[in-house]
Image: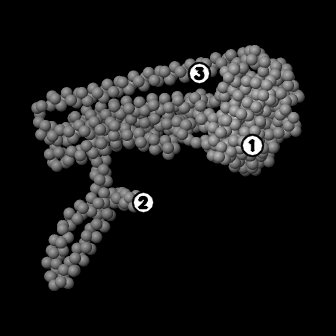
Amino acid sequence: MGAVKGFGARLRALVHRGAAERELDEELRFHLDMETEKNVRTGMNPSDARRRALRDFGGVEVTKEAHRDVRGRWLEELAADTRYALRTLRRAPVLATAAILTLALGVGANTTIFSAVNAVILQPLPFAQPERLVMLWEENPEKGWHQQLVAPANALDWKDQVRAFRDVALYMDGAHATLTREGAPQILKATYVTGNFFDLLGVRAQLGRSLLPNETWSSTGLAHTIVISDRFWRQRFAADPRIVGRTVRIDGQPNEIVGVAPAGFSFPSEGIDIWQPTAWTPDTRGQDFFRRAHFLRAIARLSPGASLATADAELQTVAGRLKLLYPGTNKYMGAGLTSLHKFLVGDTRLPLLVLLAAVALLLLIACANVGNLLLVRAAGREREAALRLTLGAGRARLVRQALTESLVLSVLGGVAGVALGVAGTHILEALQPAGMLRVSHFVVDWTVLAYVLAIVAGSGLLFGTAPALWSGRRSPAESLKEGGRGGETRRMRRWTEMLVIGEVALAVVLTLGAGLLVAATVRHGLHERLRHLRSSGGGVLHRDHSSGHHARVFPRHARAHATGPRLHPRRPARCAARCHHQRAGRPKILQGPESDRAAHHLRQGA
C-alpha cells in the first residue's frame, strides 16, 4: 500500500509540477529561516547567519535536485521522452501513419479473436457453481453413436439411482411455438424443459417465479405455464411489470406467464423466447416408447463432495443395470458425461485457438514491418544521436528515448486497434454460422483490454528494440565522420534483410495455415449442407398421432428437432424418430431403414 501511495504522490507531482516546485521552495525557505534564526541566537549578525545556514545546508539547488530524484525523476524523464516522441512523430506523418495503421490491423485482429476466445473458452458459465454442472448423454458403440440424445425414462432412472447427482434436468432446444394474441401471430423460439431446469442451474427469475419441479408432469399432457425471456418481455410486452399472471395463447392453448428470466439468460441457445414445461402424463414413464425414443438433452448437478470420476463410475453402473432390466431398448446403450463447459465448447476450442495463433502471427508480421521502418529511420538519425552523445547525453538515455518512441507508436496503434477490434466483433457476430459457438455476442471487456494492453506493450518492445540498440551502439566520433560508413551501411542492410526474411517466413506460415483452416471450414459447411439436403428428402410418416399416448409423450414441440422442412404439428412421433442425435445444436437426422425402424418402435408403443 505504501508503494502505491508513493507512486500516486510522484504522479501528482509530475502532473502538478508547478505546485510541487512551489511547495519545495517554501519548505527549503522555512528550513533556511529556522537555521538562520538559530545562528542569530548564537550571536552572529543576520548576514553571517544567513551565509552560515546556506553553507551548512549544502546548496539549495543540490538539495532540490536530490529531492526531485526521490520524488520520481524517472517519471519526469518519461514524460519528457513521451513529449519528444510525439513531436518527432508529428515531423514524420507518413511514417507515423503507416506504422499506426499497420499495428492497428494486427491489434484489431487480436482483439476480435481474443474476445471470442474469452467469451467461449475462458469465461465461466453464467450459472451458480458452474463447475458442478455436467452434461449427460447416451451412446451405442455397436452402431457408432456417441454423445447422442437421451431417452427420458433412462434419464429419470439416472436421476433416481446415481447418488453422485444431486439433480438431473432435461430439455429440448430449437423448437418453435406460435403466439396468438392481438395482431398477427408470432413464431417464438421455445425450449421445453423439466420443471427443475432453472433450479438446477441456479437461475432465479427477475419477475415472478421459475418453473416448478411438479410441472414436469401434467394429468392432461398439456402445459399451462411459461417463463419468458427478458428480451421477449421487453420487445413484445414493453417491459410491463404486471406481466406475471397474464394468460397468452401458445399454439392455441392458454398459458400463464409465471416469470421473466433474468436479463442476459438464454440457455441452452441464443434468442430463446419462452421456456415451457414438458407436462408429461404420469402413466407414460412406464411405456416402452418413453425409453425407446431419444430426443432430450440431460444436465446434472453433482452432489456436494462428489467428483466427476465418481459420478461417471456410478453412471456406468446404473447404465449396465438398465441394460439387464430393459434388453429390448437398452441392450447396447451406454452412458457418458463431461463437464457442461467442456461439452458446450466442444469442437470449437481448437479452431478458435488456431485463429488466435494466426492473428498472433499477423501481429508479429506487423511488428517486423514497423521495426524495419524504425530501423531505417534510426540510421538516418545517427548524426543527431552523435550530437546528443557529444553534448553529454548517456547511451542508456538514448536507448530509453528510442524505446519510448516505439511504445508511443504502439499505444497509438493499440487505441486504433481496439476500435477496429470492436467493429470486428460485430462483424464476427454477424458472420458466424448459427450454433457454431456457444455464444453469439462478444464483448470487449476488462479481460480483453488487459490482453490488448499486454500485446501493445510487448509489440512496442519487440519492434523498438533493434532501432533503440542501433541508436546507441556507435561512438560519436564514428557517427560524425563522413568516411567509414560503408561497413555500417552493410550492417544496416543485413538487419533489414533479416527482418524482411522474418516477415516472409511468417507470412508463408500464416497463409498456409489460413488456407488449411478455410478449406476445413468449407468442407465442414458443405458436409452440413449435404446432410441437410439428404435428411429433407426422406418420406414423411402419414400416421396421425393427434391422440393417444404419443400426443402426451411427444407433444407439439418435438417436431422442431427435424432440420428439414417444417413438420406438421400433429406428427410429433416422426420427429422423435428422426432426432436421434444432436451435437452443439446441429441435429443428426436419421433416415432410410434406421428411421423406419425407430418410427416402428414408436408405433408399437401407441
**Mark 2 to mark 1 CA distance (whole Å):** 48 Å
Under mark 3, the amino acid is: Gly
Q: Residue at x 51, y 44 (%)?
A: 445
Under mark 1, the amino acid is: Asn
Relative to residue 44, is residue 287 depicted above or below?
above
Q: Residue at x 75, y 43 (%)?
A: 196
Under mark 2, the amino acid is: Met
> Which disc number belongs to residue 205?
none
Q: Position of residue 539 (x, y in %)?
A: 77, 16
Say which of marks 3 and 1 sits in front. Answer: 1
Disc 2 and disc 1 in contact, CB within 8 angstroms: no
Indicate which disc, 2 or 1, sits on the residue closer to the N terminus: 2
Q: Residue at x 65, y 39 (%)?
A: 310
Q: Which residue is mark 1?
A: 196
**Mark 3 to mark 2 CA distance (whole Å):** 55 Å
Q: Which residue is mark 2?
A: 1
Residue at disc 3, secondary structure: helix
Q: How many marks?
A: 3
Q: Which residue is mark 3?
A: 525
Q: Residues within 10 Å of mark 2 (few under 14, many from 20)?
A: few
Indicate which disc, 3 or 2, sits on the residue closer to the N terminus: 2
Apparent side of residue 285 relative to residue 588 in the rendered image (left or right):
right
